[in-house]
Image: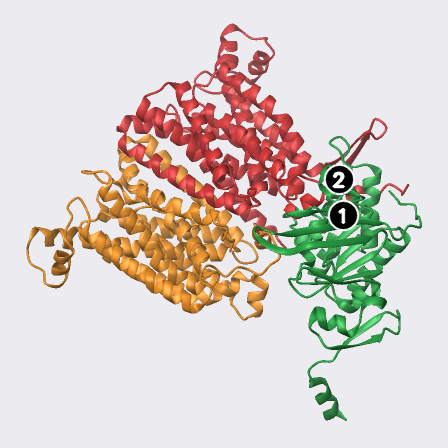
Chain colours: A green, B orange, C red
Amino acid sequence: MMNKIQPAPSATRIEARSATIGYDRRVIAENLSIAIPDRSFTVIVGPNACGKSTLLRALSRLLRSASGEVLLDGRSIQSYPAKEVARKLGLLPQTSLAPDGITVADLIARGRYPHQKFLQQWSREDEAAVIRAMEATKVTELSGRLVDELSGGQRQRVWVAMVLAQETPLLLLDEPTTFLDIAHQIELLELLTRLNRDEGKTIVAVLHDLNQACRYATHLVAMRDGRVMAEGLPADIVTAELVEAVFGLPCLIIEDPISHTPLVVPRGGGEVHAIQEKAS
Amino acid sequence: MTSLAEVQGDDRARPSGLAESNGKRFALLIFATLALVLVCLASIAVGSRNIPLSTVFEALFSYADSDDHAIIMTLRMPRTLLGLTVGAALGLSGALIQALTRNPLADPGILGVNAGATFAVSLGVGFFGIATIQSYIWFAFVGALGATVLVYAIGSVGRGAATPVRLTLSGIAIGAVLTGISSAFAILDPATFDRMRFWAAGSLVTPGLDNLTVSLPFMLAGAVLALLVARPLNAIALGDDLAASLGTNILRTRAVVVVAVTLLAGSATAAAGPITFVGLMIPHVARWIVGPDQRWIILFTLVLAPILLLCADIVGRVIMPPGELQVGIVTAFVGAPVLIILARRGKASGL
Amino acid sequence: MTAPANTTLMFGRPFAVLRLFGERVTQRVDLRGLTVTLVLLLLALAISIYALASGEFQVPVGDVIGALFGQATPRVHMVVVEWRLPRASLALLLGAALGVSGAIFQSLTRNPLGSPDIIGFNAGSYTGALVVITLLNGSFYAIAGGALLGGLLTAILVYVLSWRNGVQGFRLIVVGIGVSAMLTSLNTWLMLRADLKVAMLASIWGSGSLNGLGLDRLLQASIVLVLVTPFVLMLARPMRQLELGDDAARAHGIDVERTRLGLMLVGVALTAIATGIAGPIAFVALAAPQIARRLAGSAGVALMPAAAMGALLLAASDVLAQRAFAPSQLPVGIVTVCLGGLYFAWLLMREARRQP
C-alpha cells in the first residue's frame, strides 16, 4: 500500500499528549508531549535509561499511558482495533524470540500476519512483500537458512526485514543498529532514508550513535530523565551546550564534510592531547 | 527455552535480589544459619513426646542411660542429622541442575535420579524380596547412578557434547521408561505395590545412623565438587560463548556438575526415598534473595534447604498424633505456599 | 506484479502454494509436515485395524473391513464394532487430543518441558479422583466427575494465583509447580491411607486406562472434540505469532492476554476430556509434540503432526497394554510412558548423530 506523496510536512502522524508512562509503579516519563511529524525520519537520542525505549513502547501501543493519551492519525491509539494499528504501524522491539528451527523466509513471512486472514494466508502480495523486504535488507541468499545459525548481525537484518514485510506507513525501530558492523549500520540507515524519502514512510528510530542520528534524522529528539530537552532539525538544535546538557559530554561541533550535518567531536579529558604530544 | 529478557519483561539491568550488597548477604546468611540451628534443636526436642531443651543438651554432652536420652540419641539425633544432610544435598543438587540447564523447571530428578532409584528398589522388592531400609539404600543408590550414566550417555551420543537441552530431554525419556517399568512391577504384584507406595513417600525415619554413614561420604564428595564448580557456573550462566571466552572449560564443568548432582541427589534419594520439592524450590528462593551469583546461591541453598526439610519433618510428627506424616508428603505443603507468595511479589526473576 | 517466486527455493524446504477461487483462498502448505502427518496417521490406522483384528477372538482383516462397512456376520459385528471399535477409536481421538494439548502448552511456555501439568491439571484431577475413590467410594461417573472437577479447579486456582496485571509466563510456571507439588503430596497421602485393594484400584485409574470403554464414551469424546476443534484451528495462527515474543506479537495486532487465556482453555479442555474418560495418561502430551517436531523439522511446535503422533502413540500403547502380558491387562498409561520414552530417546540419539 503506497502512500501518495502529498505536501503536508507539518502534519503529525503520531503524538503523545501529556502522557505519563512507566512500569508497575515506576514512572519513567511524566507529562510528556511529543509530536512526530508526518513523513519525517525522527531519531530519538539520549543517555541510557532516559526513557527513549519506554517512549517508543508507549507510541507503539505496547505500553498504556497512565494518564494523558497517545494519538495516531488524530485518534486515541487505544480506540483502534489492534490489527488495524498493526497495519499502520510496524515496530522492531529490542528483544524478540525466534522459535527453534525457523528459517529466515518463514520468520520474515510472519511479519505479514496483520494483512492475512484465516482463509488468506499466502497471497501474491504477501509473497512479493517478503521478497522486497529480503532484497532491501540484503538477506535474500540467506532465505532458506535457519535463523539459529546466523550471526548476530545477520539475525538483526532478518528482524528488520520482518518489520519491513509488514509494509506499514509508520515504522518504529528500537535500536535497530545493535549487533551490526559499521558497514551494515550505514547500509540500514541508508535503507531507512530511502524508505522515508522515496516511499514517504514515517520513521521513528532510537539510535545510540549521536553522529549517525545527526546525519540521517530530519527531526531529532533529545531526551534526558524522561523529558524532551530539544527537538528539531539536527542542524538547528545540535550545539555543544545541548550535548553537554543531555549527555554530560564536553564536545566540539563541526560540520560533517560529506553530509553537512553537525558532527560531534568529544573533547575528552586531556588524554588525547597527551598522546598527540608524545607522538610529535 | 524461556528467554531471560522475555521473562523479565523490559530492558533494564538484571535485578540483584533482595540483598544487594555482600554485607547484607553475609548478615542474612548468619541469620539463616542461626535459624537452622534452632530448627535442628527443635527437631530433636519436638515430637510425640516433647523433650525439654536442657535434657537435649544433657544427652549431647553428658549422656546418661535414661529414656529421654535414649530417644534423643537413637531416634531424634539420627533423624535430625539425616534431615540436615539430605536437605542440604537435595537443595545443592537442585541449584546445580538449574544453573546447568538454565531451565527453571529443572529439578535433580531430571537426570533420572529418582526414576532410577525407584526402578531399582521396585526391582529389588519385586524380584529379590528385599524389605529392610538398609537393603533399599544400596539398590536405590545403584539405580540412581545407573540411570544418570545412561541419561548422560544418551545425551552425549553423536558429535558435540551433552548440551543442557539434550541432557534434559534425555533425562525425561529415560526417566519415563524407568518410571513406567517400576509402575508395571507394582501393578502386577500387590506386595511390591504396597512396599513401593511407602518407600515413594520419602521418610527420614531411620534406626540408628546406618543410612547416614552409608550416604554421607558420597554427599560430601558431591558437595566438594559443587563448591569447586560454583565459579565456572557463574560464567556459564552468561552463555556458552561468553563463558568460553572467559576461559571456562564448559565440557569439564558440565561433567563435574552431572557427577556432583548424581552423588548428591542419588545418595539423598537412597537414604530417604524420593523427596522432590526441595531441590526445585530452594534454589529459586535463594536466587530471589541473593541474586544470580552461584556462589551465594549455593551457600544459601545449603542452609535453607535443610530448614525446609526439617520443618516439614517436625510438622509431620506433630500434626496427626499419634501417627506421623512422612516428610516427603509435608515438604510440598510447607514449601509451596512460600514459593507462591514469593512468586507473586514481583521480585521473581528467571535465572 | 512481481514474478511468482519459487516458494520451495525461498523457504529452503518443500512447500505447496494453493490459490483458489480467484485468490480468495490462499494457503502455503508445508509438504514435509503434511507428509509426516499422513504417514503417522496411516500407521495409526494400521495399528488400529490390527487391534480390531486380534485378541482372544481372532478376526481376519478382510472381515474387519467388512464389519466396518456393515457387511459381516452378527458375531463378527459384535466383536469388532461393539467391543473393539470404541476402544480403538478412543485411542486415536484421545491420543490426538493429548498431542495437541501438549503442543499448545509447549508453545505457550516456550519450554520443551511444558505440558498441561504446568497448570496443575493432572495433579488436580488425580486428587479429585482419589477423593472419590478412597473417601467416597464412587462409581465410574463419579470418579470421572471428580477428576474433571479437581483438574478444572486446580487450573483456575493456578491461573488466579499467578494473575497480577496479566499472567506472566514465568510466574505461571512457578505457581503451577507449587500447586502441583502440594496436590501430588496430598495424593501420596491419600494413597497411603487407603486399603491396599483400594489403593491399587486408584493407582490403575491414575495410570490411565482404556479398558472397558464403550460406545457411549466414544460419543461423548467425539462431541467434545467436535466443539473444541474449531477453536484450535482459529487460535493456531495467533499461537505461532506468540512464539515470537509478547512484544512482537502485540506489534502484529494480537491481544496477548486473551489469546493466551483462550489457548489455555482449549489445552485444558482437551486434556480434561482425555482424563475424564480414561484417567490421566502420562507422557503423550509431553512426548508427542517433541517427537512430531523433530520428524517434521518444523519451526516451533506443529499442531497437526503432534495430533497424528499422539494418536499413533496411544493406539500403539493400547495394543501393547492389551497383548503384552495377556491375559493381564496393563493400564495404557504405563505403556505410553515406556514406549514414548524409548522412542524419544532413540530420536534424540538419531538427531544427534546427524548434526553437522
Name the residue carrying label 1. Answer: A90
Local secondary structure at mark 2: helix
Local secondary structure at mark 1: strand
Q: Where does the C terminus of chain A fall, quadrant-wise? A: bottom right
Is residue B249 in view from this perspective?
yes
Q: Where does the N terminus of chain A fall, quadrant-wise? A: top right
Q: Point out residue C36 in the picture as x, y percentages from the top left corner.
A: 64, 35
Residue placed at 42% from the left, 35% from the top? C123
User: Would you place residue B55 above or below residue B199 in this image?
Assistant: below
Mark 2–mark 1 Cα distance, whole angstroms, equals 10 Å
* B14 sits to left or right of A184: left
- First in residue order: circle 2 vs circle 1: 1
Residue placed at 83% from the left, 47% from the top? A169
**Of A31 and B245, the residue lying toward us:** A31
Q: Verify CB contact (< 8 Å) between mark 2 and mark 1.
A: no
* B343 sits to left or right of B6: left
Q: Residues within 10 Å of mark 1 (few under 14, many from 20)?
A: many
Say which quarter of the image contains residue B64: bottom left
Name the residue carrying label 2. Answer: A114
Q: What amino acid type should be assigned to the residue bearing mark 1?
A: Gly
Say which quarter of the image contains residue B285: bottom left
Q: Point out residue B208 in the picture as x, y percentages from the top left corner.
A: 17, 52
Is residue C12 in view from this perspective?
no
Q: What amino acid type should be assigned to the residue bearing mark 2?
A: Pro
